[in-house]
Amino acid sequence: MEQGKKDETLTILDNRTGKKYEIPVTDGTIRAMDLRQIKVLDDDFGLMSYDPAFTNTASCVSHITYIDGDKGILRYRGYPIEQLAEESTYLETAYLILHGELPDERELAEWMWNITHHTMLHENIKKFIDGFHYDAHPMGMLISSVAALSTFYPEARQIHNTASRLKQTFRLIAKMPTLAAFAYRHMIGMPYAYPDNDLSYPGNLLNMLFKMTEVRYNPNPVLERAIDVLFILHADHEQNCSANAMRNVGSSLVDPYSAIAAAIAALYGPLHGGANEAVLRMLNEIGTIEHVPAFIKKVKAGEGRLMGFGHRVYKNYDPRAKIIKRLADEVFEVTGRNPLLDLALELERIALQDEYFVNRRLYPNVDFYSGLIYQAIGLPIDMFPVLFAIARTSGWIAQWEEMLQDPEQKIARPRQIYHGEEQRDYVPIDKRKYQPSESQAAER
Ligand code: ACO
């Protein structure tokens, strides 16, 4: 929400008591705590607002990312995503997101040096990864190994120490690609490839993923840039499920590795970062263009969702999806066209004309096309959300930093409306009557 006018108020008439209340409106928002004064009896708790899934609740004031979902606008620190995707690099964008301003030449060089020189992992991390099954999902491996980093850097618990926070920031952004690549190499039974600090951030990721026996891995510049752009697009997205997890868990003042592990877990789900994976599984299931109408029919009948479509905030074309669609063409020039692209285009064509999707304002989101690029680059579907997690790390840290600096924030702890049993007395086990459920009774 952009800043609104000052001195606006809302008058509330409580029909239970006939009392009137005047409540300040700031930035188009009332404070939930201003409702607490509204009571029937003096010893009442006071009025609360009920908002499952936080669909109409601002949980913080933020300066990082601005989204206008109706207009399809996304900006980091005021800079339009289209300009950043065109002109910037992921590391520069990460600096911007974290520091609030674009770096000058010296600041950028220092920032890149610091990230580059924290890419190595403690050798013991390899032992954890070795312990996973060959078919372990890499998001599971990433969650666990990021959480494990907290045990290597116990000083990370000093979350009020600025220098320590900065050090953990370097480490997290630097080590995430190494952890991701190690998880991938474990999946395919290949020896781990160590970081090459002479390469760019995305170039080094490609090196650690795909290096074989060559002495020096030379990343393809088109693919290197494609990864960089995808990472810019995924770097932050204000108060989404994983950012909220980062702030929520971080508000207990736990170390950032543990909070990021929670954020990655939130990202893993198919309704969030797991959607790019789900899109590819859906496209594979549909198989051919002829099956598209039948699939759309099933979605409209409520039998599953069109993955990669719809967004809580965007009720217009996701601006990131537009950029990714263009990027896909550049990547396919190098890798060859992903045969699933035609299927995706046909799904989009039909869905954008269909009343069901039009009325609900469902458009392709960032994940509809990103998976096709990752697949063309040679990554298995399971790795897609892992790449997303690498990119989002800078956003999570920025959200966490902002939460820690905000004097209004404290441990996140929502209220509830209790609809359970009233108080009752404990019944000893021999006095409890066994009541079979309906299905158990029917089986008898
Ligand atoms: N396919 C079919 N119908 C859909 C879809 C979809 N992808 N998304 C929403 N709808 C329908 C719902 O069934 C609902 O219809 P109804 O009003 O008849 O009940 C209506 O549109 C509104 O949907 P909600 O679920 O209320 O919307 P919400 O804002 O809660 O959900 C979400 C947003 C989770 C992204 C949803 O659109 C979805 O599940 N999309 C598919 C998963 C996906 O692509 N997720 C990635 C999001 S981007 C990201 O996290 C990086």
Image (cartoon, grey):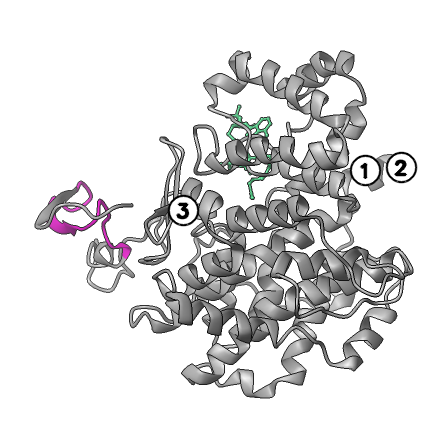
Amino acid of disc 3 = Asp
Q: Nearer the viewer, residue 140 or 219?
A: 219
Mark 2 C-beta closer than 8 Å to ligand 1: no
Marks 2 and 1: in contact by CB < 8 Å? yes
Magenta part of the chain:
14-32
Quarter of image, ligand 1: top right
Specify the amino acid type for callout 1. Answer: Ser
Mark with earlier residue (3, 1): 3
Relative placement, left or right, of 94 versus 195 is left
Mark closer to the observer (3, 2): 3
- Judge depth for marks 3 and 1 and give the one in front: 3
Per the image, label 1 sits on a secondary structure element best described as: helix
Residue position marked by numbered label 3 in the rendering: 51
Q: Residues within 10 Å of mark 2 (few under 14, many from 20)?
A: few
Q: Position of residue 32 (x, y in %)?
A: 28, 54
In the depicted structure, whether residue 195 falls above or below residue 223: below
* Amino acid beneath label 2: Glu
Q: Nearer the viewer, residue 340 or 285?
A: 340
Say the numbered circle drawn on residue 439: 1
Q: Secondary structure at mark 2?
A: helix
Q: Can residue 279 be seen by looking at this rendering?
A: no
* Residue at mark 2: 443
Give the CA separation, mark 3 to mark 2.
41 Å
